[in-house]
Image (cartoon, grey):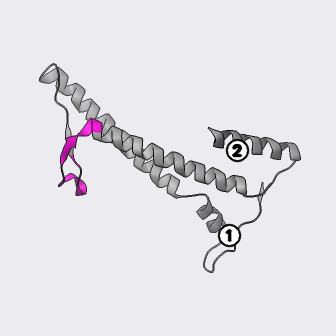
Amino acid sequence: MVVRDIPAVPEGQTRKEKVDDCNRPQKDKIWEELEGYKKNLARAEAVFEKSKATTKPEGTRTTSRTGLLGLCGSKVDSIEYYNEKINETVTKLEAEQKVALSEISNKMLLLSSSRTGLLQHQQLRVYMLK
């Protein structure tokens, strides 16, 4: 696949680095953040389930501090807090994906045949309309 209309490459940067910059590395950071929240949520739910078996039948919900490194800030219910953070992060990730898709669709792609190009364009449009 050949990509055209790449902006001018600044000094000290290769064309590959410029193309990688256009592929939105921000999306990867958001994805890692989302995975971290999911891991913390799974841990909080596991602790809650274990507390049901050992202490009270209704269980004891874990709490977390919302401040710096979990050392300061207000105490909140961990399960609710991480569910809220996951929902916020998913929204940010979807917005970032739409931006990336619009950037891709705005670039001119030269493919091996016109049929392949038409199919690629249709797939992008369908995904953007979701």
Residue that extends furthest to the left in the rendered view of this protein: 55
Asked which secondary structure carries label 1, the reply is: helix
Q: Quadrant of residue 84?
A: top left
Whether residue 3 is situated above or below residue 83 in the rendered picture: below
- Label pair 2/1, CB-CB below 8 angstroms: no
Question: Foreground mark, 2 or 1?
Answer: 2
Question: The C terminus is located in which quarter?
Answer: top right
Residue that extends furthest to the bottom in the rendered view of this protein: 11
Q: Specify the amino acid type for callout 2.
A: Leu
Residue that extends furthest to the front in the rendered view of this protein: 129
Residue 78 part of the magenta-drawn span: yes
Q: Position of residue 105 (x, y in %)?
A: 71, 52
Q: Position of residue 80 (x, y in %)?
A: 28, 36
Q: Front-most of 32 and 125? A: 125
Q: Quadrant of residue 50?
A: top left
Residue 123 part of the magenta-drawn span: no
Distance of label 2 from label 1 (alpha carbons): 25 Å
Q: Front-most of 109 and 36? A: 109
Q: Which residue is mark 1?
A: 15
The disc label shown at residue 26, or none: none
The disc label shown at residue 124, or none: 2
Asked which secondary structure carries label 2, the reply is: helix
- Count of numbered circles on the image: 2
Which residue appears at 82% of the width and 51% of the height? 111
Question: Which residues are the magenta region?
Answer: 65-80
Name which of mark 2 and mark 1 comes first in the sequence. Answer: 1
Whether residue 69 is situated above or below residue 57 in the rendered picture: below
Q: Specify the amino acid type for callout 1.
A: Arg
- Quick one: label 1, few (<14), some, or many (20+) residues within 10 Å? few
- From this viewpoint, is residue 68 visible? yes
Q: Front-most of 78 and 128? A: 128
Question: The N terminus is located in which quarter?
Answer: bottom right
